[in-house]
Amino acid sequence: MSGQSSAQLDRLKQYFSYDKEQERRGIFETVRLPVETGSVDGETVDEMLGEFELFRGVMVEGDDTFRYIPSSSQKSSLEAAFESHPDSTMADYFSVDTNPLDMDSGATEKHLTLGEDEAKTALQKAHPPATRSPSGTDLQKAHPFPFSATSRGITLPHQAASRSFEDSGPTRRLQLSEETGEQSPFSTAHAKKYTYDPDEAPLPLVPMRELLKNKQAGELFLMGLAGKGGVGCVYRVIQRSLSRMVAIKHVNPASSAESPNKILLHEGIITGYLSHSNIIPLHTLREDEDGLPVLVMKYVEGVSWAELLKDDKHPFWERTKMGVEDPLIRHIEILIAICKAVEYAHSKGILHRDIKPGNVMIGEYGEVYLLDWGIAKPIEGVVPRPLYERLDRIFADIRGFFGTPVYMAPEMFDDYGFVDERTDVYLLGGVLHEIMTGQPPHYATSIEGVFHSVIQEALFTYEASVPSELASLCQRALHPKKEHRPQSAEAFRIALVDYLKHLSSIQLSDTAMKRLAELQSAQQFELSTEELDLTPGAVGEVHRTFMECRYGFLQALREWPENPNARAGLAKALEYMFLYEIDSRNYKAARGLFMEMEVPEPRFEVLLNQLKFDLSQEREERIHYKKIKHENDLSIGGRQHVQLMMGMAVLAALFIVMRFVWGPPQDLASGYRRAITFAGVATGGLLLAIIIGRDYLLVNDINRRFTFFAVLCCTSVTVNRLIRAILVQPIESIYFYDLMILGCLTATAGVTIRGWLSSLSVVLFLGALFGGLFPQQVYAIMAISFAICWLLAGLFLQRENATSSLSSF
């Protein structure tokens, strides 16, 4: 390589730069070569290819710089071309083919094509080596357009910067005459550079006057009017070349809108810019004979959502095949589809600004389309700059408010720049509001009322029949302040999807809420009567209602753990049942409910502790009462007492028989002995019986007292007789005083032990009376009185045992 070329290459290297961000996006690094370095001769290019084999293609940037990005596959072709003519420039090998592509994004593609052999021939004809300057041809004059070289020739793909349409006019080609090698008269290679204006691009013509008059024009055949709007009319048209039905939207001659042609053009450009399954595709944007825009779109057979929203029994629902019976779920699913369209539009930098059921169409197969993008607003900095400027120029002369007043957000009455994605969220909330209530959010009988409703900052409230989750979403979406709304259409859509996921849980909790109301009303009735109905039937009904209620809430929480209604309902059910168990004095059940509460009220713990204390006191009282009852229960050991009393009665009868058998005593001494002996035998027999039956006769306090009373009676009689014998009292007085002493003892026992013992005292006192009246028969009277008393005591004991046995059941 010559010294000049080497110096030139060193000079070029100082301008080399590498774009790492592009490399991360899959684009190879670039080399920037400033034009002022002069022409690039073959040896320099060859050297550059040797050092930068990975580079591919060449791109023009601005007026003074081009990027050189060859690949290793291009190296051989370029080396071969420049080897033959080392003093040539790259421009000597190029023809120009510049084709505009995506006008909305500002993208263009340029092709410089010339085969290798053709390039050599053209070079020899156009620039003979003898006439060329050693420094080569001026790059600016030679138009060094981007290129890439392959074995088939030299070509260039070029993506222009979005902010410039330079050199991107209609197809232009540098044509060389086959005979002279000179540029043809049609060549534009040396034309002045210009900026491409998409507004000046010619639109295909649709002869609307002819079509409307004759029903056909060219390949179009008019089928009829599909519908009218405030801006345009939509016609059903057959496009015969493709044998398909299309929809043509044209300016409504009777439109009262300001500049309807601009609104329709604006809608066409935006609809063409957007491509989504929930946005009707725009086939092409054309113009009529008067230069008015004509939108050729996909034809959809369907019904307005506004019409379907008013009638859940509309016949069209059967045709949609949506497969959902619940009207609310149907409308929520439609709104979710609209949210997807709005999400996509926001991602492309477009705000709809007129979302409402009237701008939604439902297709016969359940397709959902968001229509009428005529007042949509592009977001500066998000949409491509050329598209933003074009749309801004269209709306430059249109002033006023944009939107449907009964749905509008407060900020839509402010300046144009104050709306953002959250404005569309407000409109989505308004549609949900209409689904829930049947009316738009700002429904009023006058336009003044509508505007007042829009600008006031009062929050919406909803009836209890509206699902709380949807009511909460509506309140947030329709909040006057944008920062309190869901911050994106995606967030709004996710909330709707979550509601559908939670729907089963919500339905379970709603059913449980009805049972909770029954439980609450039952508790309030109990409290109002100040007396609990603790009959088995009433208690069972309360517990059954509570179990159904709790089960419903638990199932709802199992399906959606964050279900606020189910969580609150379960807490209420536990509280109601806790208070019921407290009133029922059921500590164990109340404590279980208390432990189940997530955050029990402090007063519940106080109530629980008080109940525990009261029940403890009652338990002690019951124990004491049972002990007293046990100590005073003659039924314990009652059978043994009856046997004892009957035995004593038999013994008394035996004494009578013996008296008649033995006859009266012969003297006073024998009378004393017989009296003392009989008393001693009776007392001894009683004591023996007590010893034998002590486990029964002495088992409790009443039995001990009763037994001691019997012993006291026998002992008193024996002692009385001993004293009377010592005092040498008449025998008759002994028996008389026996009856008096026993009468007094039984009367006292009737007060202290059992009341029925008083009846025995009556028998004994009567015996004493008759003994006093008939002294000679006093012994018989005494024996009979004793026998009657023992018999009566046995009968009373037997009856008491029977009564105690019945009361124990």
Image (spheres, rainbow, N blue to C red):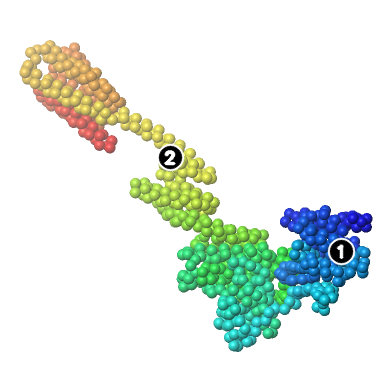
622 vs 236: above or below: above
Disc 2 residue crowd, few under 14, some 14–19, many 20+, Cα 10 Å:
few
Whether residue 789 is visible here, answered yes or no, is no
Q: How many marks?
A: 2
**What residue appears at the point 19 percent right and 28 percent down from the top-left corner?**
794
Residue 469 image-quadrant placement:
bottom right
| Near-viewer residue (169 or 425) | 169
Depth order, front residue of 552/493:
493
Side of 268 where 329 appears, left or right: left
Tell me if residue 206 comes above or below residue 701 in the rendering: below
Q: Give the position of the C terminus as an image quadrant.
A: top left
The amino acid beneath tag 2 is Lys
Could you say whether the residue bearing mark 2 is in a helix, strand or loop? Answer: helix
Q: Is residue 358 visible?
A: yes
Q: Residue at x 90, y 61 (%)?
A: 37
The percent coordinates of residue 715 (x first, y second) are 22, 18
Q: Quadrant of residue 481?
A: bottom right
SS type, badge 1: loop
Judged left or right of residue 350, residue 744 is left
Q: Residue 255 or 690: which is nearer the viewer?
A: 255
Q: Nearer the viewer, residue 751 or 91?
A: 91
Q: Residue 588, which numbered label? A: 2
